[in-house]
């Protein structure tokens, strides 16, 4: 970890320029620019509310906030991992000519998507106030799932970007998997009516854990159990360790496949 931090400091200028480039590239030739970071999830939220309220949200208190929690977390995971997957291939022209740490490109993508997430998070808090959500000191604990989610996205991004160098099919498989994952993350429906066994199976989905943490703090005003925290940390450590191992093992081979 300390070696990685030293590398980031050594290539700080390059890292900052990569973040600026990715951010500007995302909104290049758009009229609204950064406004899309806020407008896009809001439009998605509006559509989901119109479609699912009648079927799943009838009689559910704070259903808009419930939806927003799920959409907020999943959108960040979706954007971060999808962009992270192509981070190596998209910067092949740089690292094939200059010897720089290849994970810098993935980190820059994650910083850019994290900025978008932060902007949307601010809007989320505004919606909470409109939805008469009671703010308390427990909201500070949201820093835990946010930090864990960022680390988790980096870990998944490390794995996907390494695989994408060798197997281009990963891009198509991941898009299908994301669609399946969205339906398995209880974004627009509740699992309260399911059996205990089914509820426990949902805990195997790391994305659902992050969504559930947000809902417990914001809507239920309760702090998840220590076991819930350990489960989230375990998921993060597993993907980060696997991702770092893949980068370390195939670091030199990346040059031959880009």
Image: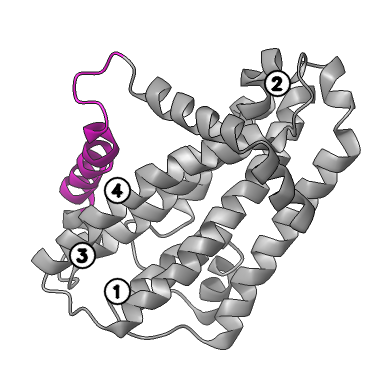
Asked where in the image residue 2 lies, by quadrant, the reply is: bottom right
The percent coordinates of residue 158 (x first, y second) are 70, 41
Q: Which residue is mark 4?
A: 119
Per the model, the C-alpha gap separating discs 2 and 3 is 39 Å
Span shown in magenta: 29-52
Q: Main secondary structure of the magenta part?
A: helix
Q: Earlier in the sequence, mark 3 or mark 1?
A: 3
Of mark 4 and mark 2, the one earlier in the sequence is 4
Residue at x-position 35% and y-position 71%? 215
In reply to whether residue 37 is colored magenta, the answer given is yes
Read off the residue under disc 3. 63
Foreground disc of the pair 1, 4: 4
Q: Which residue is mark 1?
A: 218
Left or right of 93? Residue 31 is left
Place of residue 18 in the rendered image (x, y in percent of width and height, measured from the top left): 54, 28
Does 26 appear above or below 135? Answer: above
Residue linked to disc 2: 168
N-terminal-most mark, 2 or 3: 3
Query: Where's the C terminus, which quadrant?
Result: top right
- The correct choice, above or below, for 69 with respect to 170 in the image is below
Cα gap from disc 2 to disc 1, whole angstroms? 40 Å
């Amino acid at each position: 970890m300390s070696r990685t931090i030293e590398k980031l400091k050594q290539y700080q200028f390059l890292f900052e320029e990569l973040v600026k480039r990715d951010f500007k590239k995302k909104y290049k030739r758009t009229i609204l620019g950064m406004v899309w970071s806020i407008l896009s999830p809001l439009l998605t939220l509006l559509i989901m509310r119109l479609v699912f309220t009648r079927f799943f949200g009838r009689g559910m208190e704070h259903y808009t906030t419930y939806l927003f929690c799920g959409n907020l977390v999943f959108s960040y995971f979706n954007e971060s991992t999808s962009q992270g997957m192509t981070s190596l291939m998209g910067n092949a022209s740089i690292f094939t000519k200059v010897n720089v740490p290849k994970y810098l490109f993935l980190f820059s993508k994650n910083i850019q998507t994290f900025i978008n997430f932060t902007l949307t998070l601010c809007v989320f808090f505004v919606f909470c106030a409109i939805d008469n959500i009671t703010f308390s000191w427990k909201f500070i604990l949201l820093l835990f799932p946010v930090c864990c989610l960022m680390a988790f996205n980096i870990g998944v991004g490390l794995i996907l970007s390494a695989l994408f160098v060798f197997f281009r099919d990963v891009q198509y498989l991941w898009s299908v998997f994301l669609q399946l994952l969205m339906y398995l993350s209880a974004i627009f429906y509740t699992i309260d009516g399911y059996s205990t066994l089914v509820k426990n199976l949902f805990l195997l989905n790391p994305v659902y854990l992050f969504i559930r943490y947000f809902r417990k703090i914001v809507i239920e005003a309760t702090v998840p159990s220590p076991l819930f925290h350990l489960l989230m940390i375990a998921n993060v450590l597993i993907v980060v360790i696997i991702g770092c191992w893949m980068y370390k093992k195939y670091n030199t081979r990346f040059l031959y496949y880009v």
